[in-house]
Image (cartoon, coloured by chain):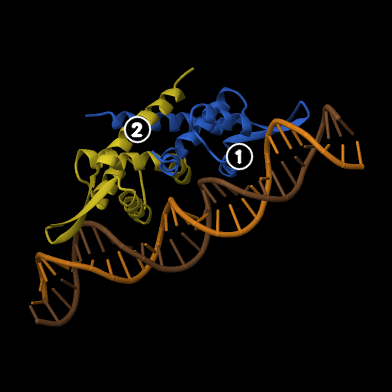
Chain colours: A yellow, B blue, C brown, D orange
Amino acid sequence: MDNQTFRDFFLGFIKIHILYHAAKEPIYGQEFANELNRHGYKISFGTLYPIFHRLEQKGLLIAENKNVKGKVRKYYFITEKGNEILTEARLKAKDLVDELFEN
Amino acid sequence: MDNQTFRDFFLGFIKIHILYHAAKEPIYGQEFANELNRHGYKISFGTLYPIFHRLEQKGLLIAENKNVKGKVRKYYFITEKGNEILTEARLKAKDLVDELFEN
DNA sequence: TAAATTAATATCGGTTTTCGATAACGAAAA
DNA sequence: TTTTCGTTATCGAAAACCGATATTAATTTA
């Protein structure tokens, strides 16, 4: 599967994963990108950062700057609304994937 | 979850489902849209048809016109390459969704 | 204390995708 | 020959994507 097809199919999954990870513990861009890389998924910062911004605008995440070893990180926390959306998205995602394995 | 968020998260899933359904039996636009509706998912024809076109351009689907009761339908069949991509996508999708339920 | 380094976020501009609305198609029916 | 009807195609504006480049801010080095 070429990269373009991969992103076309899976960028939505990655957005749900952002909520999922932010629900477990605050995340920031570089770290999240690194974790994606570790799993073999690549995403440009020009794509990733605007996604964070939009999730924040929609009220699903909240950002908080934190200074770590002299570098400013923008940590994202999930909101209550974000958690509700995550719960809903998780179930829908499961249904859709389960259906792919029927037959 | 508002419609825009839904599409943002799930349009990729729907693309995989197009391959999945085309692998089971030939599908055409209206019917596929109807089935999505039945499951509560909405997608505009201005979005759906170009998706079919791109999947065809990439060699994952092949189209064939068929005349049914005087109406021309464009049936899409999956190709061998499409089947390979589907198999790969299905596994990746499962992994990603399984991870959403860890913890 | 000025310059360079570093980890990180932000944004730019060109391209692609999305999408509601509207147009076009083609066979059958009127 | 016009109308109807199920269906596909396309339009134009908005949004998203993305690789590249710029910016930020504290620390280290000179």
Vertical arrangement, residue B40 with respect to residue A65, above or below: above
Amino acid type assigned to the residue bearing label 2 in the image: Glu
Q: Which residue is mark 2?
A: A88
Question: Which residue is found at the position 11% from the left and 58% from the top?
Answer: A69
Viewer-side residue, B102 vs C18: C18
- Looking at the rendered structure, the secondary structure element under dot 2 is helix
Question: Which residue is found at the position 57% from the left and 33% from the top?
Answer: B33
Amino acid type assigned to the residue bearing label 1 in the image: Glu
Circle 2: is it few (<14), some (14-19), or many (20+) Cα within 10 Å?
A: few
Instruction: Name the spot of residue C13 as percent of width and height, x first.
Output: 47, 68
Give the mark count: 2
Instruction: Return the chain for callout 1.
Output: B
Instruction: Name the spot of residue B60 as percent of width and height, x first.
Output: 57, 36
Q: Which residue is mark 1?
A: B56
Instruction: Return the chain for callout 2.
Output: A
Using the numbered discs, state the Cα–Cα distance from disc 2 to disc 1 in whole angstroms.
32 Å
Residue at the extreme top:
A103
